[in-house]
Structures are given as structure tokens and as C-alpha cells.
Image (cartoon, rainbow, N blue to C red):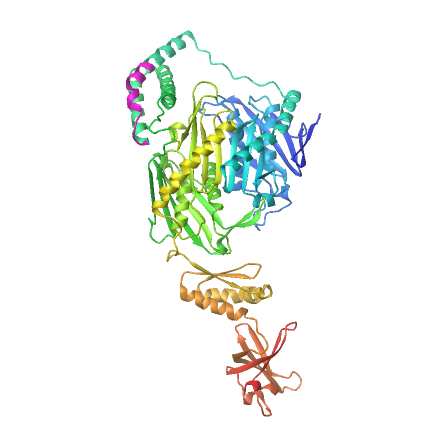
Amino acid sequence: MDIKTYNITWGDRPLTIEFNRFAAQANGACTVRYGDTVVLVTAVMSDNKRDVSYFPLMVEYRESLSAAGKISGSRFIKREGRPSEESVLSGRIIDRSIRPLFNDAFRNDIQVMVTVLAYDPASDPDVAGLIGAAASLMVSNIQWHGPLAGCVVAAKDGQFILNPNQEALNNSDLNVFVAGRDMSVVMLEADGRQADEAITQSAIAFGLEQIQPVIKLLQQIQTELGKPKITLPEVVFTPEQTTQKTEAEKIAQEHFTNIVATLFGQGNKRERHQRMDKALAELKAKFSPEETEKIGYATKAFDHLFATEMIRRIFAEGKRVDDRGLDEIRPISVGVGLLPRVHGSGVFQRGDTQVLSITTLSSPGNEQLLDTMRRNEKHRYFHHYNFPPFSVGEAGPMRGPGRREIGHGALAEKALLAVLPSKESFPYTMRVISEVLSSNGSSSQGSICGSSLALMDAGVPITAAVAGIAIGVAFQGEGKDNYKIITDIQDVEDYDRSMDFKVAGTEQGITAIQLDIKFDGLSMKMVEEVLVRAKAARLQLLEQMKQIIAEPRKELSPYAPRIETIKIQKDQIGELIGPGGKVINGIIEKTGVQIDIEEDGTVFITAVDQAAMEQAKLLVTAITKRIEVGEIYLGTVVKIVADRNSGKEIGAIVQLTPNQDGMVHISQIDNTRVEKVSDILKEGDKVRVKVVEINREKGRISLSRKALL
């Protein structure tokens, strides 16, 4: 094997890309090592062209617990199963980065697979995976318009860190994954703590600058190792087909000219589709049923004419398909508290996109446990996004969440994290479900708005409301210099050479960004314009949301559980739990509450019924109370103690709390001489005693009845 290795120092650690060691049968393959993270990336193209109307690209991201030196904690399943949500999101980042640089006329299956072989927490495998995807595609014979690279940038107090470690990510003001080529942005994924637009723009520009050494390395690799690229077969028309195509396009042009005025204007998505369906039906009726090729040519020409006219109206008249201005948001409708018994609900509607979000509050014990290659932690806030077929007027099978649902849910979750209360001030586990009831563009941003409403309706003390908006672009001509930014895009505007630039945040700043494009990159000038436009739109949305609910409700729903906190010493945790959980389970069974104990001694009691809460608090307090010398108790005699050898009674055991007792020696029972303990004390008697001595090492408490006589 003629192994080829390329090395550079990138940031503060080495980057190594190696070829010809593994996966020789793939069209392109490499390993990428960044720090101690190692990924294997392969690119494969099928030999046969598929009869489909879309570009069949698959990006798979595979994590193995072995990469982090772990074995699954499950007692029954030790093998990796379906990809974790974290893996799905990583795959989406790489997919959204490389997809715009393919010729979407491809109809051969293309699969890019990223396999994480070794994981270094300080070096993001997503960054290595994207670089590997670019490298494997560039050395392959697959036509792809790279190079492209990506990095993570953390911003803190105006300073930027390239590919930061987890601690820096957790403490930053903004984290942004930037994928780009030359000095243009191809993909963005960001989370912020209400980050300023200027800082965000600077962080993106910093990321573009930092990936340039990697792009130069990839160019060198392609020059030295790249295979000749396959060429797409040209579509050659016979003279008869050319005649049919020309005739069909002429008829489509005449028909479109006659009815174009009916296709544009105010109306909802269904009405517009009905107008379009009617126009296409009338066009097809101009041909005989046997003229299938002509109908196909005419239909394709009609779609092209519609898109061309849509762009013309944007540039010539400043109007969209529904007569909106370029920066105009569709009509907004907001509501809260729509559902009985749930802890919080909010509905957000923008045009034809309608989302119902529902908040559920629960105990800390219901936190989600994450045990993946990268994480072993608890998750106290999670957002789930559902996109049923009826939301787009279709009938279809209901399956589990797909990559799109997982991605949109994660984006909405990320947008709210910055405004959530701390666990110390609000110890609840929080779940929000967003049900997309109707969709016509940017349902993920509707979910962000709906989640904010539902959380405030539930009384979750978020620090600020959050809203999101999707920004698009229209180009005139072949280049990218002549463009118009459009606010609040809908389905028909997410077309060829378009973008979906989602920005979420508060009045103060940005909390989340996600960018998808269908061209080969946007300039920093466009990024700046989008951030300015998105902020103006976001403030409009927040103002309308404020009219319905301006701040979180002061009281939780009566159906939401209440949580109270008790702090105990760490060495008392065992006492509260008891042997085999006997003590704590006894309290739970007796009161019906839920009790969760943290390692630092924080005890959370969760209950809907206040009487049960008070009873549980008394029991926990009694069990964990630390007895001190000099305290007086009314205890219960539970046992008369006799000497093992002589059998003579020497004292009585008195229970002071449910799990603590002490002994009254016979000499401490009375002021006069006592011959037999049982002459004065019997099992079950209530007796007042004073604590006179404590031996904590041996766990002994000495009591006196005599001291109180």
C-alpha cells in the first residue's frame, strides 16, 4: 500500500489526513486525525443511475462507544443500535455542508460515511468528519465542487477560540460551526447566550479565515491524489424530440402568459396550490393523452416560467408570490393556555404555518440520562418536534422521528437553553412537545416561538421570550452579485439557488442559528444583511407575543407538581436511603411523593398534593436530623437491654427519630436506685430524655431520664 500522509498544525494541535491505508474499494477514503480524535471517512457512488426526481445523497455518521473507551451500560444490549440523536445531528451538519457543492442532476446513489474510531473530548469529531468528507470526495472520481472545510468558533468577551474544548464551549457567549469554501459561507450551526449580531458576524468571519489553511491542504491533496472526475452524460435530443420540446414549450409560454395574473396574489397555501393545479390541468388538456413526452416538456417549462416570474416580481416590483413586501412577515396569531390540565400550552401561527407547543414539568428524577460516545450526563430540558403528514395536507404512515424531526427539535431546544432558569432556582425537569398542525415554511421557527409561549404559560421563569425567523434570498441572473434578501420565506420560495437562514433569539441577542443553502456559498456581506433583517423581524414577533403574555406566569398550573428542597449532610444520604432503599421507599409508599437525592446531599421532594408534601418533609427532616448533646426528646422505649452474661437489665433503648435511637443506662433512669429497668420503663412507653453524650465514630447516643426529673 502506497500510504500518503499530509500534516499541518491547525490551531494548537496537529491535523493529519492519511490515504490508502483503509477501505480500498470505496471511490474515495481517508482517515483524519485531529488531536487524538480519529475518523474514517468513505465516499461511494453506485454504478447505476436511479429513476428518481431528486439527488440521492446519503450521509451516515457512526459513533462507537469503543472510540471513547466505553462499553454500553445496558445489562442486555452491548452492541450499538440505532444512531443516537447526537450522531444524527452530526450527520446532518456534514450533509448540509457538502450537499450544495454537488451537481443535483446526479441520479446515482452517493453515500458518505463517517466512522469515529477514536474520540478526544478536546477535538470535535464533527470537524474532523467534515474535513474527511471533503478529502474523500476530492480524491474520488465523484464530481464535487470542493474544497470545503469547517471549524468551531467560541466567542467569549469579544475574543475567539478555534475548535475549543468542552469547558470553553460551556463558558462561551457564542458557539458557531462554520463550513465554507474560499471566503464564502456554505453552512452555519450556532448556539448563543443572547449574542450580539456584530459579535456573531465577527465569529463567522474568524471561522472562514481559520479554515483557509485546511482548504489549501485539500487543494494540494486533490492535485496530487485526485482521480479524474466522471462527467454527467449529456441529454441528447433526437430531431423529433427537439421538435416536440419546442412545440410544448411554446404552448406552455402562451398558456402561462394568459393566466399568470391568476397565479400570484393574496391567498393561503391551499388556494395557491389550487390555482396552480388548475393552471397545469388546463395546460395538459391542450395535448392529447398519448402525448406524454410533450406534457412532460410543457409541465417542466411551466414550472420554470413560474420561478422566473416569481424572481422578476421580487426585483421589478418588490413583491412576493402573495404580494408581500420583501421584508414583510405573514400575519401572526398567538395564543396561550388553550388546553386544560396540561402544565402550559402555546400556539403560534405565521401565515399557514401553525404550531402547538405543550410544556410538561416533572421531578429531577425524570431527567434524561445521556450515555453516548461523547456524553455521560443528565438532560433536564428537552424539546420534541412532530411533523405529521396532515400538516402539509397529505396522508401517510406514522413512523418514529426522522432526521428532519430530530434536527428541528434540537434547533428549537438550543434556541431556548440560554434563557432557562438554573436547576438551583427551578429544579424541574422540563419537556416541550411542538406539534406542527399546518406547515408552509419554517415550522422549526414556529416551534421556537410556540415553546417560548408554552414555557411562560407554565410559569417557567425564563429570563426572556425567544422568537425565530427564516430569511431567504433571490438571485437574478447566473451570478451572485444581484440578489435580494427576503424575510419569512414560505415553501415556494425555498427553490433552486435559495437559502433557509434561520435565526432565533431574544430582544437582547441571538440564541440559535441554522443555515441551509442551495448554491455554492454566500458572502459575509450577505451574512451581515441577513442578521440585520432577522433582528428587525424577531423584534416584531416578540412584540406581538408580548401582547398575549409579557412574562412567565407567577404561579404554576394547579396540575403541575411542586418541588421543595431539603439539604442534608453527605454522610446522611445513606441513612435516608436505608438498607436496600428501605427507608426512602417507605416514605414514598406512605406519602405518594417522589424523592430524588443528589450526590451533594440535596433532596428534592416532588408532589402534587400539598398534604403529602408536608408529611414527606416531616419524615425526611426527622430521619436526617442530626442529634446534638443537650437536646431533649420525647421518645419511645423500643427495647429493654440485658447484660449478655448475667442477664441483668442494664438500660433501655429509646427511639428518638424514625431511624435514630439512644440508650438510657439504668443509672440515668431515676434519681433513686433502680433495681430493674422494667420496674419503671416498659416497651412502648413514651419517655422524655436528654442527650448527654454522643460517640459518632461508634454511632452511640447516651440518654438521661434522670436529668429531666
Q: In the image, residue 653 lies at what x, y percent?
A: 57, 80
Q: In the image, residue 151 lies at what x, y percent?
A: 59, 34
Please count the marks in the image: 0
Front-most of 510 and 415? 510
In this orientation, does residue 455 appear?
Answer: yes
82 magenta-colored: no
Is 555 drawn above or below residue 512 in the view shown? below
The residue that appears at 41% across and 49% down in the rendered structure is: 455
- Most extreme residue toward the top is 239
Is 99 drawn above or below residue 298 in the view shown? below
Front-most of 28 and 364? 364
Q: Quadrant of residue 354?
A: top left
Q: Is residue 77 left or right of residue 279?
A: right
Q: Is residue 386 left or right of residue 201?
A: left
Q: Is residue 621 left or right of residue 353?
A: right
Q: In the image, residue 592 lies at what x, y percent?
A: 44, 63
Q: In the image, residue 91 lies at what x, y percent?
A: 53, 35
Q: Quadrant of residue 561?
A: bottom left
257 magenta-colored: yes
In this orientation, does residue 113 appear?
Answer: no
Front-most of 135 and 186? 186
Is 358 drawn above or below residue 575 in the view shown? above
- Quadrant of the image for the C terminus? bottom right
Front-most of 679 and 311? 311
Q: Quadrant of residue 374?
A: top right
The residue that appears at 43% across and 9% down in the rendered structure is: 238
Magenta segment, which residues? 253-268
- Quadrant of the image for the N terminus? top right
The prevailing secondary structure element of the residues shown in magenta is: helix
